[in-house]
Amino acid sequence: MTFRASVLTLYPEMFPGPLAVSLAGRGLAEGAWSLETIQIRDFATDRHRSVDDTPAGGGAGMVMRADVLARAVDHASQPGDPRPRLLMSPRGKPLTQQRVRELAAGPGAVILCGRFEGVDQRVIDLRGLEEISVGDFILSGGEPAAIVLLDAVVRLLPGVMGNAQSGEEESFENGLLEHPHYTRPQEFEGVAIPDVLNSGHHAKIAAWRHEQAEKLTRKRRPDLITNRVTKDG
């Protein structure tokens, strides 16, 4: 089964962008996943191809229209399409590695890239859009966020990553940040690779890596430690 991504955007020229190179690009070329872009303006009905209007109740900026977006979503996601409908939005639920894995195990996704001040709430509710955020910051639009999401998902698809084990030991996979990495030269500017990594003792190496991961997580992301304790408890 090929993972199918349909991206609804005002700027289709932004795709595939970075997704055309490295792991994602190779997977795209080899057919591990497919990508189509859909121009939202094609579903406007006036001669100006308007996709937005002033916010009800007043305020700054413009809001993307529900009727135009609904037609675009309906075109991309026909009845019976099992793919989730996602809206890239700063107010969405934070994207996690768990959600990434869920998406990678599915048939694909329909991704709406928001612009301006946001999207009319009615299309979100009536079309069942799942709002997803890639961080607590504001972008000029949902396109960069969609690229981030797709890159995270595509690399987990079967055959895309050269060594499947690489994905199992990364940050967030076990609730911790990833341990430090080292490679040659043996000594760099007076700092040597930790002895344990040259010991050949796999159990000791695994224990050291876990200890370092916990230490790093406690320092940089104590919230992840708290979440682990809550789940285990």
Image: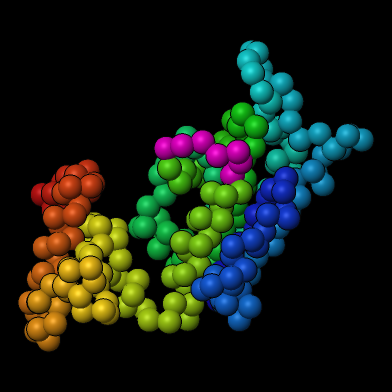
Residue 88 is left or right of residue 57, and the answer is left
In the image, 161 versus 219, the foreground residue is 219
Residue occupying image coordinates x 36% and y 57%? 97
Examine the rendered structure and indicate whether residue 2 appears above or below residue 228. Answer: below
Q: Is residue 217 visible?
A: yes
To which quarter of the image does residue 50 belong?
A: top right
Q: Is residue 206 visible?
A: no
What percent of the width, then of the height, locates residue 94? 40, 44
What percent of the width, then of the height, locates residue 38? 73, 54
Residue at the extreme bottom of the image, as rendered = 200
Question: Magenta span has 141?
Answer: yes
Q: Which span is picked out in magenta?
A: 136-142
Residue occupying image coordinates x 56% and y 76%? 27
For the rendered model, the colour scheme is: rainbow
To which quarter of the image does residue 215 belong?
A: bottom left
What percent of the width, then of the height, locates residue 191? 17, 68
Residue occupying image coordinates x 61% and y 55%? 110
